[in-house]
Structure formats: C-alpha cells, structure tokens
Image (tube, grey):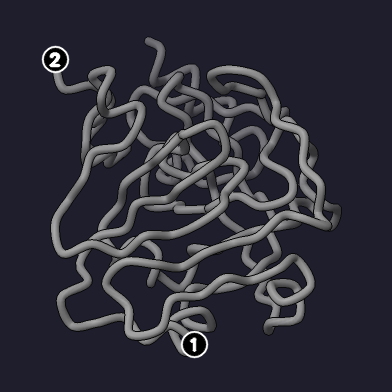
Amino acid sequence: MFRARAERKVEKAGIDPARLPPGQYMTEKWPVLHAGTVPKTDLATWDFRVSGEVETELRLTWEDLTALPATEIEIDIHCVTRWSRFDTRFKGVHWRDLAALASPKPSARFVVAEAEQGFTANVPLAAIEDENALIAYEAGGKPLTPEHGWPLRLVVPSKYFWKSAKWLRGLKLLNHDQPGFWEGYGYHNEADYWKEERYEF
C-alpha cells in the first residue's frame, strides 16, 4: 500500500517511479537532519585537507578550493529516514581534480570524510570517484545554507544521504575501511538504498 501511494505521487510529478528506491517517498522540500548544533565557520581560517594514502597531502584555503575547476551535477538524494528528493543540483569540485593534486597511492581503497565537531562518514574510494559524486559548495544555484553543510559538504548519490557528510573539512584515504559516526550507532556500513541497507540490526 505504502509503495503504491509513493509511486503514484512520483508519477504524478512526472518522474519515473523506477527512480524511487524501496521504502522511500518523494518530497519537494529538503529536510534538515543532523546530530548536534550547526557549527560557526570563519572562512579566513577555514581549510580543507586531503591526507592519508596519497603522495602529496593537501591543505587548501577556501580561495584555493574554489579556484579549482567547478563541476555541476543533478542527482536524486535518498535519506535513511525514507524521504527522497529528485533532481537536486549541486556545484563544487569533483574528486578527480583533487586527485590530480594529491596523487592517491595504489593502496588507497577507502575514504573517511572528516567534518566539523568530530563527525566522520566512510565510503569506498570508488564512491567519490563516481561521475556524479562531488565536494559541493552550492545547491540549487546558491551557496549551501549552514543547516545543509555550508561551506562544504560531500555528495555521494550512490549511498543513503548520511554518507554525504556536512561541514566537510577533509578526506582521508585509507587502505582499509573505517566505520564512521553513524555506523558506530548501528547504521549499515554499505548504505545501499536499493537494498534498503539502513541498519545493521
């Protein structure tokens, strides 16, 4: 019953119902969900780092980062709390342009996104190499709002959206997987929304 209603709403909006993962419903709003408070950021002292299994560790200022080639994507995002938002536009830096500077080692297979307040999220390196993944600073043609991760967030559309860490400060490449913040509270390590990998229990 839930699936049928959700699919009818999606179809009425002119969207192919096949784009809606199981257990999800469509929303046109962008709900705000996070643990803790929204951090305050001073771009004059802010930096972004790429570290770990790389030949050259990076420390980029805001000006350095935004001077890199910009990429724009339009993707669907799916939250573990069951909402889905279609055709969401983001602008930012693609991993390939950071990789060209950092030169990942052959041993690099996983990434830990390091964010403000000690928050982390883990994904395979392949997830951020994807053409539709991004280190984003704009959404919908405007700078990210603080509640949605300004000044920078990771966008990994192949996973439930908690993997797209807000208030991003760095990417650490590893030769092994290292579960992030929410995985420590029982969220599924893989987070594949087509398989409904929401929780481990």
Task: Identify the element where label 2 is drawn.
Answer: loop
Alpha-carbon neighbours of circle 2 within 10 Å: few (<14), some, or many (≥20)? few
Numbered circle sitting on residue 201: 2
Task: Identify the element where label 1 is drawn.
Answer: helix
Kind of residue indicated by mark 1 = Leu
Residue in the image at 42% along x and 50% along y: 113
Numbered circle sitting on residue 193: none
The picture places residue 77, in percent across and down from the top left corner, at 52, 42
Residue in the image at 71% along x and 55% along y: 46
Q: Residue furthest front?
A: 45
The picture places residue 129, in percent across and down from the top left corner, at 38, 72
The picture places residue 104, in percent across and down from the top left corner, at 31, 81
| Residues tagged 2 and 1 counted as in contact (Cβ below 8 A) | no
Image quarter hosting the N terminus: top left
Image quarter hosting the C terminus: top left
| Quadrant in the picture for residue 163 | top left
| Lateral position of residue 197 relative to residue 25, left or right | left
| Quadrant in the picture for residue 74 | bottom right
Kind of residue indicated by mark 2 = Phe
- Note whether 62 is above or below 167 in the view shown: below
Residue in the image at 23% along x and 62% along y: 174
Q: CA distance from mark 2 to mark 1?
A: 40 Å
Q: Earlier in the sequence, mark 2 or mark 1?
A: 1
Which residue lies under the disc numbered 1? 101
Alpha-carbon neighbours of circle 1 within 10 Å: few (<14), some, or many (≥20)? some
- Note whether 114 is above or below 21 in the view shown: below
| Lateral position of residue 182 relative to residue 141, left or right | left
The picture places residue 81, in percent across and down from the top left corner, at 45, 19
| Lateral position of residue 95 relative to residue 31, left or right | left
